Amino acid sequence: MKTTFFAAVTFAFAIAGPAGAEEPAQPKMSKEQQEMMAAYERMGAVRAEQHQLEYFVGDWSTKSTMWMDPKAPPQVSEGKSHSEAIFGGRYIETKFEGNMMGESFSGRGTMGYDNLGGRFFITWIDSMSTGFWLSYGSYDKASNSYTYRGSMPDPMAPKTNVAVRVVVRIIDPSHYTFEWNETHKGKEAKTMQIEYTKL
């Protein structure tokens, strides 16, 4: 019978014992338990990919440009963003404050690298929705950019999903851009771009 994650954690706590207690004699782990502990260590390791995302840590001013109607001028607004490493550098958490369509707008996101899946990811929630966004992607060293792909329900037709491609381009140590591209009726168009400048 395979050892479950809960059993592995319980076993680890049993070995450690309560805080402040004398360290008990440690029972020898079975080969399966040793392999499981090693697997979880690999899963939670902070590797070069996680360190690479430290670029985004800090405070940034933002300029958002939205194309709601291709025949009309874009909407431009300013905001601010704060990102920090959490859980020992395993993720980058972002807090965004600005406005959208004339209303105050707040968002929260995370980015990271999934050691098991071998890919980067981003998540997002905000004050103008009740769902969440999740997409996976990769990094291209030649262009110093990340490309993520996902989908979201169309607000005008909730049972229809819209394909989304996000490109995060690193320009220099103090500037990067976030580009949001949606596909409607088989045609992709950039509907939003956010320019970040480090403070």
Image (spheres, rainbow, N blue to C red):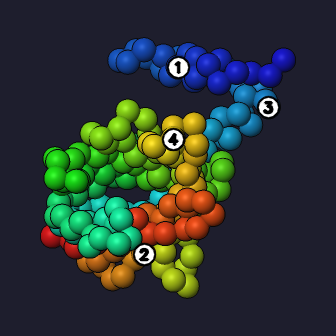
Mark 2 or 3: in front is: 2
Label 4, on which residue?
A: 157
Q: Is residue 197 in sight in this rendering?
A: yes
Return the disc, 1 or 2, that comes first in the chain's sequence: 1
Label 3, on which residue?
A: 31
Return the disc, 3 or 1, that comes first in the chain's sequence: 1
Q: Residues within 10 Å of mark 4 (few under 14, many from 20)?
A: few
Q: Residues within 10 Å of mark 1 (few under 14, many from 20)?
A: few
- The image quadrant of residue 21 is top left
Q: Residues within 10 Å of mark 3 (few under 14, many from 20)?
A: few
- Secondary structure beneath label 2: strand
Res. 13 mark: 1
Label 2, on which residue?
A: 169
Q: In percent of the image, x 58 and y 17: which residue is there? A: 10
The percent position of residue 188, horizontal first and vertical second, equals 55, 68
Distance from disc 2 to disc 3, alpha carbons, whole Å, reads 45 Å
